[in-house]
Image: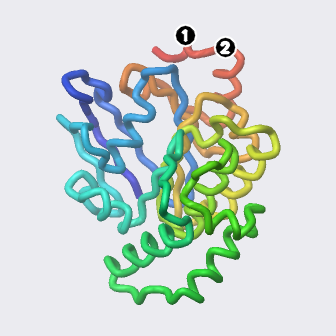
Amino acid sequence: MLQINNLHANVGDKPILKGLTLSLNAGEIHAIMGPNGAGKSTLGYVLSGRPGYEVTEGSVTFNGQDLLALEPHERAAAGLFLGFQYPVEIPGVSNVQFLREALNAQRKYRGEAPLTGGEFLKVAREQAGALGMDMDMLKRPVNVGFSGGEKKRNEMVQMGIIDPALAILDETDSGLDIDALRTVGDGINRIMRKPDKAVLLITHYQRLLDYVKPDFVHVLADGRITRTGGADLALELERDGYKELAA
């Protein structure tokens, strides 16, 4: 599904990714772990097409398409979803309106009919209910006044409504208490653990992986994947840190 080959990327004049190679197949969940400044968030931003992140070498294909040749909205319509470490607030724009416009824009791009207001609300109620979110929260401005846990739960509702093929989740566990962590983990499994989907889960800690069992764990250090293993590697990192394992 996703093939990253020898990817180099700069932020300004500073090289961050320095020859990263990674392959994700449909049906797989991959966790990326590594020290601060290693390039984990940069990888997510480069894949999603965030401005200011310049690819200087390498290639990325997503379901046979040259991902780097697509604009950010085209990447989203092709099935890529980026979950933010710090979801932004959008005052004056309701969750419901934001999500309906986003979903129908993607459906239009793919040549599909837009959902009516009633059809969309049915989908939104199902996804919100599955994550224990009251529909009244979806009528509020996007993330405004939400706690950290509510923002992450709201993002899982967004992911469920958009229904992407590939989810790149950047430290989704950041700021979550135990109950919220379990809820978000259950949401990822329910929405994305399917044979035609894949997840790239960026995290500092092993705790989310208790709920979302990865097929592979990768260590990202100094802009490259330096080690790959199974779920046990995350436990090793939690116990011993990155010093001995990063190189």
Few, some or many C-alpha atoms within 10 Å of disc 1 (few <14, some 14-19, many ≥20)? few
> In front: 72, or 133?
133
- Give residue 39's quadrant in the image: top left
The percent coordinates of residue 49 (x first, y second) are 30, 49
Q: Position of residue 224 (x, y in %)?
A: 38, 27
Image height check: is 159 above or below 213? below
Secondary element at tag 1: loop
Residue displayed at 42% across by 65% down: 79
Rendered-image quadrant of the N terminus: bottom left
Which mark is drawn over residue 240?
2
56 left or right of 148 in image: left
Disc 2 element: helix
10 Å crowding of disc 2: few (<14), some (14-19), many (20+)? few
Q: Residue at x 74, y 66 (%)?
A: 134
Between residue 150 and residue 62, name the one nearer to us: 150
- Give percent across and percent down for residue 216: 57, 40
Q: Amino acid at mark 1?
A: Lys
Q: Residue at (17%, 35%) from the top-left corner?
A: 56
Q: Are marks 2 and 1 in contact (CB under 8 Å)?
A: yes
| Residue at left offset 52%, top offset 35% | 32
Q: Which mark is residue 117?
A: none
Q: Which mark is residue 243?
A: 1
